[in-house]
Image (cartoon, rainbow, N blue to C red):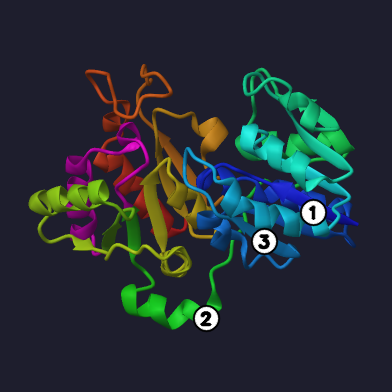
Amino acid sequence: MKILALQFKYFGDAVLMTPALRALRKQFPQAEIHLLVPQEIAPLFQHLAWLTHVWPLPRRRGSASLRETWPLIRALRREKFDRSVDFASNDRGAILSFLIGAKRRLGWTERGGFFGRKFFYTDRVATATNPPHESMRLAQLLSGWRIPPPRSLESELYADTALVDAAEKILPDARAVLCHVASSQTKKEWPLAHWAKLHQLATAAGMKLVFTTAHGEREAALMTEFKKIAPEALILQQISDLPLFLAVLSRAAVFISGDTGPLHFAAGLGVPTISLFGPTPPARWAPIGEKHLALTGGTCVCDGNLFACASQEHCLAQISPGQVFAALQNKFSGR
């Protein structure tokens, strides 16, 4: 049997799919399980031994090119998949599911999208009115094939062992705490002044904090601003290569950030995390497992689609540096 899983969402959302993929493997232990994801996130899954093949789809956010994707679609059609499961079930996923042509095609019953999208799947599952944790929600899609959810909802990733030496040169201290200050939405970012105060508290206690951010002009400008208020802070070089970033991340003693992709990378790699939540509910999006702690700020009143906070008092700002420092102390004391 050959099964193709599809996921056309980005970074953190995609990582939360790994428990569902494990459930698929358990149900079909002898099957070939393939995964089709956007090219830029394919390295996240390259070292999952229970995946047969990861197919990277060339794409740009918000646009699609049939000229670029057609050779891949033809290659996938030649695989003659018995089943496909589309964990996002958006327009792109529905069209690709149909064109790839598996005999059974599973997807969500979603509102919106182009007319007739629902007919591109042979099996469909209705989404819950009050969705559970995202990892459980994705696993519940497999109920369309009577596959029970996995026992563990912890994410699973592995860094490339060939990059161990390169990662050690970038982050030589394996007891360093990595602090990720940026997010895809500024409303999910903890105030820079709070990061500076946390650095001050941790340094006084003999802890080593290293600050990192995503690769981009806005993120670089954010770090420049942070350096002005915390001139002694150690700032990690921007790393555009995702496999190398994963290898560096896997060396951290603890990872601290808001709700962003690298938070889920760290959790999947087994790195203990402290996550800062406000605009998004931790009950649905925080890493699962004993190694992980989510701190929650005030009630967020912003619209979910807003890029920046529109409130007079930022909900994340209500998480104090003292709270995060106390949580960090508990991590190092083993409590």
Looking at the figure, which quarter contains the N terminus?
bottom right
- For residue 138, the mark is none
- Is label 1 in contact with label 2 (beta carbons under 8 Å)? no
Residue identifier under label 1: 77
Q: Earlier in the sequence, mark 1 or mark 2?
A: 1
Residue identifier under label 2: 162
Amino acid tagged 2: Ala
Q: Residues within 10 Å of mark 1 (few under 14, many from 20)?
A: some
| Rendering coords of residue 264 (x, y %) | 51, 50
Query: Residue drawn at (74%, 55%), measured in percent from left and top?
Result: 74
Quote the CA–CA distance across marks 3 and 2.
19 Å
Query: Residue drawn at (71%, 68%), measured in percent from left and top?
Result: 49
- In magenta, the rendered stretch is 180-208
Quote the CA–CA distance across marks 3 and 1.
15 Å
Amino acid tagged 3: Val
Q: Residues within 10 Å of mark 3 (few under 14, many from 20)?
A: many
Query: Residue drawn at (80%, 26%), measured in percent from left and top?
Result: 119
- For residue 54, the mark is 3
Left or right: where 153 falls relative to 165? right
Whether residue 127 can be seen here: yes
Tell me: residue 80, above or below residue 169.
above
Marks 1, 2: nearer the viewer:
1
Task: Identify the element where label 3 is drawn.
Answer: strand
| Rendering coords of residue 190 (x, y %) | 28, 39
Quote the CA–CA distance across marks 1 and 2.
33 Å
Q: Earlier in the sequence, mark 3 or mark 2?
A: 3
Query: Residue drawn at (72%, 46%), measured in percent from left and top?
Result: 20
Marks 3, 1: nearer the viewer:
1
